Image (tube, rainbow, N blue to C red):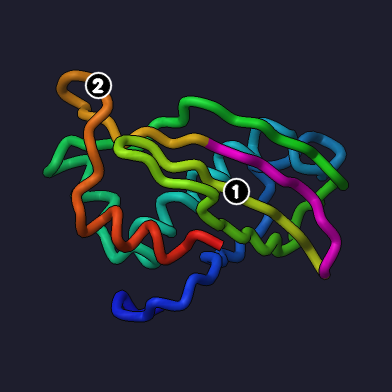
Amino acid sequence: MPVGDETPIPFIAEKQIRFHHCDPAGIVFFPQYFVLFNEVIEDWYTFGLDTSFVEQITKDRVSTPLAKVSCEFLAPSRIGEIIRMTLSVKSVGRTSVTLQIEGSCDEEARVRAELVAVNASLETLRPLPFSDQVRDRIQRFIV
């Protein structure tokens, strides 16, 4: 999505369920959804917010750890399936953002989570205010 576009829309990332996500029955082992959520957030920063997640960590020494997660597992996902992960912003504060991520496959809801991510210094491990530029980009995803 172009950075100048002001129409609020969710960020969508498709994730293939791989062997390493699954238990011996070939069904996603629930903690692996948290790995997928983190991948979606990284993709959102890089492609949705047009901010290098890698440089944010390695150069700016800023991360976005999760402070709170609420999750519902609605239906099993299996190896080989493509899960459509839809991220939307519920609210943005000075140092944190509340996200909703919904995963579905063929229109069937599989997982739903609300996550609070904190903008934090990797040096002090304390919250940092979002830059005005990042805050403006985040607000485009409030739906």
Report the residue that reaches farthest toward the left: 59
Q: Secondary structure at mark 2?
A: loop
Which range is magenta?
A: 107-115
What x and y, as percent, mark residue 68?
A: 54, 27
Residue 19 falls left or right of residue 94:
right
Residue 58 falls left or right of residue 103:
left
Q: Viewer-proximal residue, 2 or 37?
A: 2
Q: Which residue is mark 2?
A: 126
Residue 110: say if magenta: yes
Q: Quadrant of the C terminus?
A: bottom right
Crowd tier of the residue under label 1, counting other residues whose Cα lies within 10 Å: few below 14, some 14–19, many 20 or above: many
What kind of residue is marked 1? Gln
Crowd tier of the residue under label 2, counting other residues whose Cα lies within 10 Å: few below 14, some 14–19, many 20 or above: few
Q: Which residue is mark 1?
A: 100
Residue 30 falls left or right of residue 101:
right
Q: Quadrant of the N terminus?
A: bottom left
Asked if residue 88 is positioned above or below residue 121 in the image, the reply reads below
Q: Secondary structure at mark 1?
A: strand
What x and y, as percent, mark residue 84?
A: 67, 63
Residue sitting at x 32%, y 62%? 137
Q: Viewer-proximal residue, 77 or 112?
A: 112
Q: Earlier in the sequence, mark 2 or mark 1?
A: 1
Q: Viewer-proximal residue, 28 or 101?
A: 101
Residue sitting at x 49%, y 71%? 8
Residue sitting at x 26%, y 59%? 51
Residue sitting at x 37%, y 40%? 93
Q: Which mark is residue 137?
A: none
What kind of residue is marked 2? Arg
The reply to whether dot 2 and dot 1 touch (C-beta < 8 Å) is: no
